[in-house]
Amino acid sequence: MAVNPDVDESVHAWDLSMMRLAIQLAREAILVGEVPVGAVVARGNRVIAQAHNLRETLNDPTAHAERLALTWAGRALETWRLDGYTLFVTLEPCAMCAGAIVQSRIDRVVYGAADPKAGACQSLYRLVTDLRMNHRAQVTSGILAQESSELLTQFFQARRSSP
């Protein structure tokens, strides 16, 4: 990942710190048989909510890490409006999660690995920055992308090789 010289170093360090936490959550997902995606909602140095995928555990197709983290952040803050907060996630959010991001009014999305087949922030769609939407979020991509991508690759390779 290239460091952008225009980015304030403290912001960059914070992004890395929060993404490392999201990656740790993704690793925890593997331990319970979930696709390794982790998400964190934070403001400043304060983590408001964190989650990893729970689709298999809850038998819920909507239990993506991002959606869960946004839901739990809203509950913790007792409001659905998450303006001023940042969502960190290891994989580019899908259309469902991008819709939840727009609806939550989150200010910023930081993600690791791009998702060319389902990514709705930059890869396939650009829902969170679409001018037609009632809210837009700033997007920062590629933070710890290789680590995030490797977790997913290893997870799916292991799944394909087991009977």
Image (tube, grey):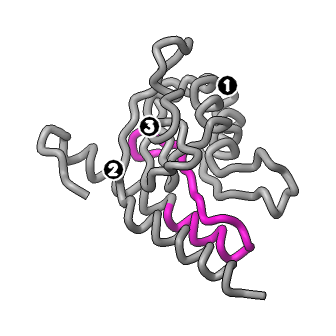
| 32 relative to 83, above or below | below
User: How dense is the environment of label 3, judged by Cα within 10 Å: few (below 14), some, or many (20 and up)?
Assistant: some
Separation of disc 1 and disc 3 at Cα? Answer: 28 Å
Which sits earlier in the primary sequence, circle 2 or circle 1? Answer: 2
Closer-to-camera residue (30/156) = 156
**Which of the 4 image quadrants contains residue 160?**
bottom right
**Which of the 4 image quadrants contains residue 97?**
top right
The C terminus, quarter of image? bottom right
* Element type where label 2 sits in the image: helix
What residue does disc 3 label? 122
Q: Amino acid at mark 1?
A: Thr
Which of the numbered marks, if any, corresponds to residue 54? none
In magenta, the rendered stretch is 23-46
| 149 relative to 65, above or below | below
What residue does disc 2 label? 14
Residue depth check, mark 2 versus mark 3: number of the one nearer the observer: 3
Separation of disc 2 and disc 1 at Cα? Answer: 24 Å
Residue that appears at 52% across and 67% down: 24
What residue does disc 1 label? 79
* Element type where label 3 sits in the image: loop
Separation of disc 2 and disc 3 at Cα? Answer: 22 Å
| 75 relative to 131, above or below | below
Q: Position of residue 52 (x, y in %)?
A: 65, 58
Does the segment drawn in magenta span residue 144? no
